[in-house]
Amino acid sequence: MSLKLKIIIIISAFLLGVLPFSLFAIGWHTLQPYTLSAVLLCSFAALLLAHLSIVKMRRYQLKLEHSEERLRLSLWGSGDELWDWNIESGELYRSCSWLHPVVLQPKTADVPPNKTQIHPQDIERVSQLLQDHLSGKTAHFEATYRIKTSDNNWTWVLDRGKAVSFSATGKPSRMTGTLKNIHQLKQTEEQLQLFAKCLQTISDAVVICDTQFTILEVNPAFSRITGKSREQCLQQRFELTLYPSRFMHDIRQTLAQQGSWHDEIKEQRLNGEIYQAELTFDQIKDEQGQVTQYVAVFSDITERKLREAELSRLANSDTLTGLPNRAVFMQRLGQLVKAGTEHALLVFDLDNFKKINDSLGHELGDNLLCKLAQRLSSYAQYASRLYRLGGDEFALLLDNTNDVLHITSVAKELLNLINQPILVEQQELAITSSVGIVLFPDDGVDPQALLRNADTAMYHAKSQGANRYLFFNDSMNKQAVKRLQLENLIRHGLKEDYFAVYYQPKMNIVSGQLAGVEALVRFITPKGGVISPASFIPVAEETGQIIEIGEVVLRKACQAVKGWIDQGLFHGRVAVNLSSRQFSLPFLCEQIDEILQQTELPSYHLELEITEGTVMQSPPQAIDTMKKLRARGIHLAMDDFGTGYSSLAYLKQFPLNTLKIDKAFIDDMKSARGRNMVDTIMTIAHNLSLSVVAEGVEQPEQLQQLSKLRCDVIQGYYYSKPLSAQELTQFLQQQKQRSKPTLVSLT
């Protein structure tokens, strides 16, 4: 209420209250009419003035109430609340808009006064901002912090205030302000900050463009990948420099139709380097669904692509030669078969490659294969058609041809190229090869059959001699099937004990008595009868099954001989053949020791027969093994002497006891040249203090001639065929009954 209005109301009240009493006191009837009229008129005017003042005052109060209501409703609607802090008394008032009012105890020393409600991590910062304002450093107090609500949760608030009253000394005595709940805004701000931080630190490049593909913003990864700074890109049109403009047009069309676009691209960095990227474009729409921007995200996949290419190369290439490997070959062969394309498959390997590895080392063998692959790949007709299947086996695919003349010329040229000497580690190697050839569709209707038949043809070519090629035919396949069946039968025979030992007696020419026996393996099946050693031994040698067969023969022979010795029927030695694979076993001596120990057979009753080819594969190693066997008291014989590639220089170093002359020399004794050959072998043996055994003696004339040549022991059908263990037992019993046998010296 204004001062003027207050004075008018006081005067009016005075006139209305005092004037009537005054008139009554002096007597109104004594007054003149005009005086009375003036008095009444003044009274009425005062009354009217008082009424008008009261009406005006009521209107003012009503406006004030409306203003307060609007302020209260505005605060309620905005979510803000008022606070009033009496600094001197420490009393704090807060309106209860969204928090319960807090009244602090009088004379509290807390600064800020709501300190107990502020989050501990925010108190120090809020206190400093408040002190800065109270000390006059800032015109207003403003702080954001967390405050505890009535339900004991923390919420973010924006606190604003100002000192409105000061003491006589100039210090603030009263401060008012507002408190606003900004928790949702703070969460949104934190999310935006998180998103911004992600865009700043993400390894993928992010580009934001307007609807015309003008770049509005990029992140640091974009600059790192492209080499372009942010300033160089903003307000520039997004382009792919290695693609025609039509490419970007297609991207825009796809975006308009589908809302997104994704593919792998190549692009050029600022320094000219080419990189690969995985690019994705997406639309950004407003609330009305209108496209406002496009966002592009791309990642540098250059290293990944290089690794994938390397992995693909490793998966599809032979690690040694670099040629396409077996998997690629089978895939390509399958494609040709599926398409029905006529083609020829040539499979080849190196003859006697194992001997190269064993004698010169695997490293040199690997280098040889690499050199050969390089030589063949240097010819255009082989470059994209040559594959390494594994080991020393290769394949050559000739598509769109079944011309036998052309295929034959290719095979001949291939053999000539392989046969040329190769210099490996300063050693010149002359190698040969065997080639098997199949034609599609004549020789097979699927990749597996074609490869199998080509292998069959190659093995048959190898059996006919070195450096040959051979086309597949049905008879080869039948032989291959028969060989596989025999291999399975051998495996089954070892499991079911189908291998028996027969014994062929050996006669001393001088005494005419039994000198010993040779153990011979026989494969006897329940349904198939006896399988010839000439059939199953080569297969067993190739598959390695000969090792187990040899162990079975040695064990059974030692058991049988021990039984005959215990019965007093036998006093000589049993000769057991050792295959080349057995002789190469690193644990051969230990295996023989174990068998002798288990059968309790004295070692001097055992003789081991070794072929020339076996000991000549590695003479130093053979000599070492033979010395170990001799040290155990075991006798050693060289079997089939003269049929291999023996060396007299090594022969005198071998710790042998006996030489066995092959049946082929005995059969040739009808001629003078044959007799001289046998005589020469015997002379060599006797000069080396070795006894001689002649194999395959079947005729009396042969026995007479051998006796004249001073042969020691004969073995053959003239004396006895190979006998089973039961038959030999009867034979020994008959020998014992006829006459007391002359003991053969075992020293």
Image: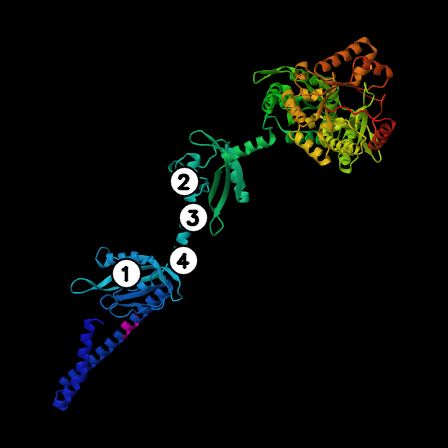
Q: Is residue 694 left or right of residue 247?
A: right
**Measured Cα–Cα span from mark 1 to mark 2:** 41 Å
Circles 3 and 2: CB distance less than 8 Å?
no
Above or below residue 215? Residue 544 is: above
**Which disc is residue 8 wearing?**
none
Lower position in the chain sequence, tag 1 or tag 3: 1
Between 83 and 742, the residue placed more toward the observer is 742
**Which disc is residue 184 wearing?**
4
**Measured Cα–Cα span from mark 1 to mark 4:** 22 Å
Q: Is residue 568 left or right of residue 100?
A: right
**Measured Cα–Cα span from mark 3 to mark 2:** 14 Å
Q: Looking at the picture, which amino acid does disc 4 mark?
A: Gln
**Measured Cα–Cα span from mark 4 to mark 2:** 29 Å
Q: Is residue 99 left or right of residue 720?
A: left
Lower position in the chain sequence, tag 3 or tag 2: 3
Q: Which residue is mark 3?
A: 195
* Residue for point 51% across, 31% down: 244
Circles 1 and 2: CB distance less than 8 Å?
no
Q: Which residue is mark 2?
A: 220
* Residue for point 24% across, 78% down: 51
Whether residue 580 can be seen here: yes
Magenta range is 58-63
| Residue 99 found in image quarter | bottom left
Task: Indicate which label's residue lies in the foreground, 1 or 3.
Answer: 3
Local secondary structure at mark 1: strand
| Residue 541 found in image quarter | top right
Local secondary structure at mark 3: helix
Q: Quadrant of the C terminus?
A: top right
Q: Looking at the picture, which amino acid does disc 2 mark?
A: Pro
Circles 1 and 3: CB distance less than 8 Å?
no
